[in-house]
Image: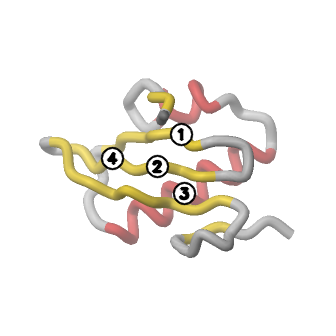
Amino acid sequence: IITYGTDNKADYYVSNIRKDGIYTVFDVNSKDDVKTFKTNMQGRFNVENALAAIVVANQIGVSDEDIAYWFGDRLEESA
């Protein structure tokens, strides 16, 4: 079982949700790293839906770069 959500106890969780012009930017945290994604979808519920899609895509082997591409942006590494 893989968990996801906004709670940092989840296997994947979203944090640092912020606006950047027309975009919503957010970090996806896992036990291995933190990746930053950007989407033009507004609202926290859309970020949570995006997180679900990111987790599923990651689990079936889709690269982070391809996931970011389908959200319409390049992947950014978080420090």
Marked residue nearer the N-terminal end (4 or 1): 4
* Three-letter code, disc 2: Asp
Residue 35 disc label: 1
Residue sitting at 38 percent across and 31 percent down?
Answer: 72
- Measured as percent of width and height from the top left, residue 67 is found at 57, 35
Q: Are marks 3 and 1 in contact (CB under 8 Å)?
A: no
Marked residue nearer the N-terminal end (3 or 4): 4
Residue sitting at 54 percent across and 57 percent down?
Answer: 51
Q: Are marks 2 and 1 in contact (CB under 8 Å)?
A: yes
Q: Nearer the viewer, mark 2 or mark 3?
A: 2
The residue that label 2 is drawn on is: 27
Marked residue nearer the N-terminal end (2 or 3): 2
Residue 65 disc label: none
Residue sitting at 59 percent across and 27 percent down?
Answer: 66
Tag 1 secondary structure? strand
- Measured as percent of width and height from the top left, residue 53 is found at 59, 53
In three-dimensional space, the C-alpha distance between marks 3 and 4, rounded to whole angstroms, equals 12 Å
* Three-letter code, disc 1: Lys
Tag 3 secondary structure? helix
In three-dimensional space, the C-alpha distance between marks 2 and 3, rounded to whole angstroms, equals 9 Å
Q: Quadrant of the N terminus?
A: bottom right
* Three-letter code, disc 3: Leu
Name above or below for residue 25 compared with residue 43.
above
- Measured as percent of width and height from the top left, residue 28 is found at 54, 50
In three-dimensional space, the C-alpha distance between marks 3 and 1, rounded to whole angstroms, equals 11 Å
The residue that label 3 is drawn on is: 51
Tag 2 secondary structure? strand
Q: Residues within 10 Å of mark 1 (few under 14, many from 20)?
A: some
Q: Residue furthest front?
A: 79
Marked residue nearer the N-terminal end (2 or 1): 2
